[in-house]
Amino acid sequence: MRHQRLDYKLGRETNHRRQLLRNLVTSLIKAERMMTTVQKARFFRPHAERLITLGKRGGLHARRQAAAFLLDPAAVKKLPWRNCVMSSPFRVTGACMKSASEPSSLALGVSR
């Protein structure tokens, strides 16, 4: 029985669905706002929130995890990184790229 299962198949095969997820999250982070269907929004919202949390955590490992998921390096830079200005590919310094006063939330418009 499928009681309270939260998997969204969206009428697509696994590889297509996985790529759709990565495309939607990358587009949302780059544009900071998007219009999509309710089902797709419910499908990718946890993944987008996880990437924002990675940015808030900061650090080289979190940046590499985000880069592995997102399709565009510009989207990786746009995340709200904390403690992550890199002076070399292997060292992380303590300076922040964004100040604490800048908003880091992303808006999501849903069309029905």
Image: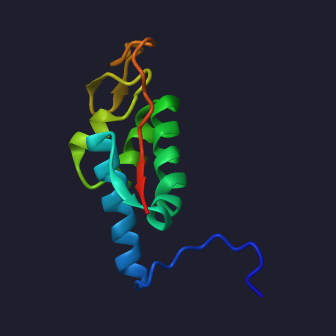
Give residue 34's position: percent from left, percent from top.
Answer: 32, 49
Extreme residue toward the front, this view: 112
Give residue 103's position: percent from left, percent from top.
Answer: 42, 22
The image quadrant where one finds the C terminus is bottom left
Seen in the picture, residue 107 relative to 100 is either above or below; the reply is below
Give residue 1's position: percent from left, percent from top.
Answer: 77, 88
Relative to residue 34, is residue 51 drawn left or right? right
Residue positioned 22% across, 40% down in the render: 74
Question: Which of the 4 image quarters holds residue 83?
Answer: top left
Give residue 106's position: percent from left, percent from top.
Answer: 41, 37
Which of the two residues, 76 or 23, is positioned nearer the viewer here?
A: 23
Question: Which of the 4 image quarters holds residue 3?
Answer: bottom right
Relative to residue 1, is residue 87 drawn left or right? left
Seen in the picture, residue 14 relative to 30 is either above or below; the reply is below
Which of the two residues, 110 or 19, is positioned nearer the viewer here?
A: 110
Which of the two residues, 107 or 56, is positioned nearer the viewer here?
A: 107
Residue positioned 23% across, 44% down in the render: 73
Residue positioned 36% across, 18% down in the render: 98
Seen in the picture, residue 111 relative to 8 is either above or below; the reply is above
Count of numbered circles in the view? 0
Seen in the picture, residue 1 relative to 98 is either above or below; the reply is below
Colour pattern of the rendering: rainbow
Residue positioned 50% across, 79% down in the render: 9
